[in-house]
């Protein structure tokens, strides 16, 4: 007779081998992900100019040459976009016309995507927000505080191999001789985004914190994330936390470092009931943390409707219910449920990474339009905190 622990171990080994095989098929052993090139239309939209003006800049030799297809079509890398944005900014009549990141006196924006129910779209939302902001010229740091490390995987790493013993955000917040966060941060293939990886070692923070509280270890758990970020925050405009699906010490530490909170919701009554419990527990725990000296002030809190199907009557009723209850705290733009987003995930990619030609055009355009509306609304919240 086989024991349950033996069966679980066998299943784990079998699944690990299958995932390794899948990764080998998708990426060569020594390969690293690369960001695709963008069409002239996409480049113009990201730069905030018209396609005709972009062509004129090339015609007048005001911007460098870019990749040209045999058919004469220009394609732009993320680095090309960065160079063009710098050139446009130097000729702009007003500062910040093309570079919309922080200016002197602006505080870094730290956003937490959270919900303690798995499957609510936290990672999908956080990675697409990070990528959209980076493509618009923001300097972004992604911090993966989920031990499952899905965000880290999406950036082309294999946490179970690359960061099994060290190299995660845990090393910067641990109680025993923490490392400077700058030694943990990894550059990614996505221009404008750096990553503080996640991994299983983050579970140690949850296990060690009760003892640290008894020993009065300083700084306390709720201040450790903010303390770690202080070393590097000058290098970024926006920092994004992908939180684990639980209200533990890691999540509370991220909340105490945040300036904005985005709670992802799938619009059905079971998820709403779960969120009700989550909000009540959050309030109770954060009261305790606040009484212990934590600063709990956010520039904004928003509910992000995720996996929304506009033709689903019950979902429409749930969204209407939420809007009546929470008003403007429910984001105007919902993130639509899309096969394009899930299909891209099969190869550990996002909608912003895959090429339009790989999908039915209507499906792809609908997904991109939905994501852009969500992320541009988030950008407007960021800009509003900077009084722009």
Image: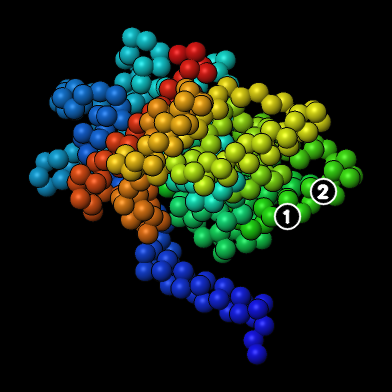
**For numbered disc 1, what is the local secondary structure?**
helix
Picture coordinates of residue 68 (x, y %)?
18, 42
Picture coordinates of residue 266 (x, y %)?
46, 43
Residue 142 seen in render: no
> How far is disc 1 from disc 2 in space, using C-alphas?
11 Å
**Which of the numbered marks, if any, corresponds to residue 169?**
none
Q: Earlier in the sequence, mark 1 or mark 2?
A: 1
Picture coordinates of residue 204 (x, y %)?
73, 55
Viewer-nearest of discs 1 and 2: 2
Extreme residue in the left direction: 71
Query: Which of the two residues, 184 or 83, is positioned nearer the viewer here?
Result: 184
Where 8 falls versus 248 (above or below)?
Answer: below
Among the 4 quarters of the image, the one containing residue 292: top right
**For numbered disc 2, what is the local secondary structure?**
helix
Q: Which residue was labeled with disc 2?
A: 210
Residue drawn at (37%, 69%) of the image:
25
Residue drawn at (34%, 34%) of the image:
372
Mark 2 surroundings: few (<14), some (14-19) or many (≥20) residues within 10 A: few
Residue 286 seen in render: yes
Residue drawn at (72%, 26%) of the image:
295
Q: Which residue was labeled with disc 1?
A: 204
Residue drawn at (36%, 21%) of the image:
98
């Amino acid at each position: 007779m086989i024991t349950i622990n033996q069966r679980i171990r066998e299943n784990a080994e079998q699944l690990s081998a299958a995932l390794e095989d899948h990764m080998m098929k998708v990426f060569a052993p020594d390969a690293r992900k690369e960001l695709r090139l963008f069409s002239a239309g996409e480049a113009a939209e990201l730069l905030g100019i018209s396609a005709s003006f972009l062509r004129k800049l090339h015609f007048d030799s005001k911007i460098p040459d870019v990749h040209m297809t045999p058919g004469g079509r220009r394609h732009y890398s993320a680095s090309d976009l960065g160079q063009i944005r710098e050139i446009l900014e130097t000729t702009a009549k007003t500062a910040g016309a093309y570079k919309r990141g922080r200016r002197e006196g602006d505080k870094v924006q730290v956003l937490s995507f959270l919900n303690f129910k798995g499957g609510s779209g936290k990672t999908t939302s956080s990675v697409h927000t990070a990528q959209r902001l980076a493509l618009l010229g923001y300097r972004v740091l992604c911090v993966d505080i989920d031990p499952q490390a899905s965000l880290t995987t999406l950036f082309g790493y294999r946490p179970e191999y690359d960061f099994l013993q060290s190299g995660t955000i845990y090393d910067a917040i641990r109680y025993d001789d923490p490392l400077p966060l700058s030694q943990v941060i990894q550059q990614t293939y996505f221009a404008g985004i750096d990553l503080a990886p996640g991994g299983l070692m983050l579970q140690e923070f949850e296990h060690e914190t009760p003892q640290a509280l008894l020993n009065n270890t300083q700084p306390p758990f709720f201040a450790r994330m903010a303390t770690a970020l202080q070393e590097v925050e000058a290098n970024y405009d926006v920092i994004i936390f992908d939180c684990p699906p639980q209200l533990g010490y890691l999540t509370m530490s991220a909340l105490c470092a945040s300036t904005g909170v985005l709670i992802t919701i799938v619009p059905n009554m079971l998820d709403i009931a779960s969120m009700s419990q989550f909000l009540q527990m959050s309030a109770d725990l954060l009261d305790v943390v606040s009484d212990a000296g934590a600063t709990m002030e956010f520039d904004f809190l928003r509910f992000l409707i995720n996996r929304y199907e506009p033709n689903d009557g019950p979902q429409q009723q749930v969204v209407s219910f939420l809007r009546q209850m929470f008003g403007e705290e429910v984001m105007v733009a919902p993130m639509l449920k899309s096969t394009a987003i899930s299909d891209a995930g099969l190869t550990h990619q996002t909608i912003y990474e895959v090429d339009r030609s790989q999908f039915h055009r209507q499906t792809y355009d609908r997904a991109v339009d939905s994501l852009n509306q969500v992320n541009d609304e988030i950008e407007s919240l960021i800009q509003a905190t900077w009084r722009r």
